[in-house]
Amino acid sequence: MKRYLVRWMAGVMVVLSFVMCSKDIAKIVKPADTTPVATAIGPTPNTGNPTHTKPASSVTCSYTVKASDWSLDGATFGPGSVICIPAGTRGALLLKNFKGTAASPITIINKGGRVTFTAAITASYAFKTQNCQYIKILGNGTAGVKYGFDVNGGNIGITMDDLSSDFEIANVEVRNSGFAGIMAKTDPSCDVATQRGHFTMRNVSLHDNYVHKTGGEGLYIGNSFYADGVSIACGKVLPHDVVNVKVYNNQLDSTGCEGIQVGSAVSDCEIYSNTIKSPGLKPFASGQDNGIQIGEGTGGKCYGNLIKDAPGNGIIVLGLGDNVVFNNYILNARTHGIFADSRYTPGPGFVFINNTIVAPAQNGIKLNSETVLMNTVINNVIINPGAGVAIAKKSTGVKLTALNNYGSTDINTCKFVNYGGGDFHLLLTSPLINAGANTAGYGVTTDYFGKARPFGAYAIGATEY
């Protein structure tokens, strides 16, 4: 017989579903001994990431940047140009007016080894674009060098600014920034060209980067105030939309605020296969210490991420209400594993499927999302929540469908191959195997490692047997 949502300590109880109900959900009493803490981040997930263009082994440079170049105007470079930056240490760089095309983007690439950009954290940036479109910033120009661009310092390490759009940043290390590691947005001003309806940032791809020791967010995409906008001298103005965002395979470590924050991404947003360790170490405002923030105006998918040791929530969801969050490992969050709130949420509701949440200090999943039509929580594993509640609701106004979730006070009941060593594959004796509901209708057809679901029937949690 399949095992469904378990209420522990007060008597075991099978729950097939909770639809628009107001009763307490899955209370779990914390035992005297604490849940073991995973000592390793775990294997790199493989979720079928799309390939990206690799430069040829022999690159023909349209222009080689000089050490003395602090600013380059792309007006003299046509689509398909390759801008090479030779190995070594140099100062900050500003690129402006580079205009490629979708078929022939302009590529900025390292040549001959690793390039280090250095700037004081009081400087505005270490690397910046202004009014650039269809460009690729690729640090993979030298074989054997994983991060061919090394951005060290600046208030913002890399900023894609001033109406920049349609860009890819890959194989870049960003460290020691005063504020954000990589920022991608144009803040609205009294110039209507910067405002919603006049400019849309499109086709943003940030992948295979290593961002660490930042003063603020690691990756900061889109404006945070989608619904209400910002008040400036000419009145209240609304930030631009962001369309088609892919944030994947990035390593984030020791960021001051969120590891990844995405706002105003109104369609085709995916955040996946990222590893986020120790975010929110020195937030400049309350509540900015989460692993991933799916901010106002953001819809889409968040999956296959591993988030460890967030001082706040593992994942906070404030999005459009068409958000599907699945196959994530959230370990040792010091608030909630997942927190959802309905702000600007025209969509039908939030969906949380096949996540594994271990030892959050408060609740496993906390739902403050009262205005959405339905919150859906299926096939999640929630181990040892500090507040003793696996799925908590703000009020009876929160509508909830809960199916086939698994709760326990002891991580060992899940039967991972080696949880303490970071191996999250399942042993044959795991009670999670074949115990889940079919979630193919929500688009969940693989697990954290990219393995096809189901193997037999669906497993509960982020890993399929």
Image (cartoon, grey):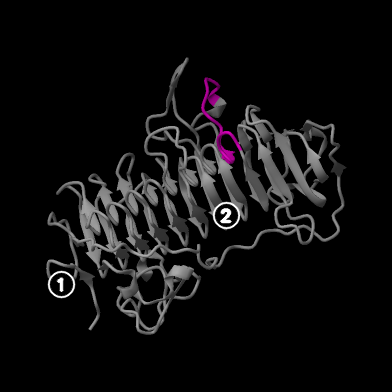
| Residue 230 pos. (x, y %) | 43, 25
User: What range of the chain is rendered magenta?
Assistant: 177-192
Vertical comparison of 126 with 300: above or below: above
Judge left or right: residue 355 versus residue 399.
right
Checking the image for residue 31, the label placed there is none
- Magenta-drawn stretch contains 305: no
Q: Report whether 358 appears left or right of 61.
A: left
Q: Position of residue 391 (x, y in %)?
A: 24, 57
Asked whether, in this view, residue 182 is left or right of residue 300, the answer is: right
In the image, farthest residue toward the top: 233
Q: Secondary structure at mark 1?
A: loop
| x, y percent for residue 308 | 45, 56
Q: Nearer the viewer, mark 1 or mark 2?
A: 1
Q: Amino acid at mark 2?
A: Asn
In terms of sequence position, does the residue under pointer 1 or pointer 2 come before the other?
1
Answer whether residue 181 is magenta in the image.
Answer: yes
Query: What is the crowding at mark 1: few (fewer than 14 residues within 10 Å), some, or many (at least 20)?
Result: few
Residue type at numbered disc 1: Val
Q: Which residue is mark 2?
A: 250
The residue most toward the front is 32
Residue 2 or residue 337, whichever sits in front? 337
**Residue in view at x 68 percent, y 44 percent:** 134
What is the distance, in whole Å, between disc 1 and disc 2 at their CAs? 40 Å
Kindly tell me whether residue 316 is visible in this rendering.
yes
Residue drawn at the location 13% of the way across and 54% of the way down: 22
